[in-house]
Amino acid sequence: MMIPNELSAKFNTLEGRKQIIAEYADSDTMFVGENEDGERVYLSVASTGMVLRTEQENGWVRVNYYDAEGEATGETFDGKWI
């Protein structure tokens, strides 16, 4: 499912991320879209938080983790996509 524009606009703030979790925690699908840099992103939302995977322009896959309150809890890299 494509990431709705209203999700993208809210993601950069703590309150916005909390709202996304509240609204989409029951979703059984991953959201797909592009960030402001034109990179492909994949967002998984659960009641326990979110995982954002980004296919960065440099070829690396960055994975950002957020808890149920929308706070960033970590970042890893998951190889290269190209």
Image (cartoon, rainbow, N blue to C red):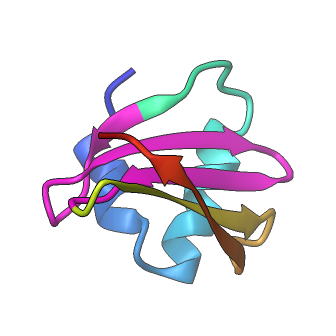
Question: Residue 16, how many percent across, how many down?
Answer: 49, 69
Q: Position of residue 24 (x, y in %)?
A: 62, 38
Is 24 included in the stretch rendered in magenta?
no
Q: Position of residue 67 (x, y in %)?
A: 79, 67
Left or right relative to 37: residue 22: right
Kindly identify the residue that appears in the image at 43 percent across and 66 percent down: 11
* Magenta stretch bounds: 32-57
Compare residues 55 and 2 and report the one nearer the observer.
55
Residue 41 lies within the magenta run: yes
Q: Depth check: 46 or 41 in front?
A: 41
Q: Residue at x 52, y 43 (%)?
A: 43
Furthest-right residue in this view: 48
12 lies above or below 38:
below
Across and down, in percent, residue 25 comes to 72, 39
Up/down of 25 relative to 66, above or below: above
**Based on the displayed image, in which of its 4 quarters is residue 64 positioned?**
bottom right
Q: Residue at x 37, y 46 (%)?
A: 41
Q: How many marks?
A: 0
- Quadrant that contains the N terminus: top left
Q: Is residue 78 above or below residue 27?
A: below
> Is residue 50 toward the left or the right of residue 54 in the image?
right
| Quadrant holding the C terminus | top left
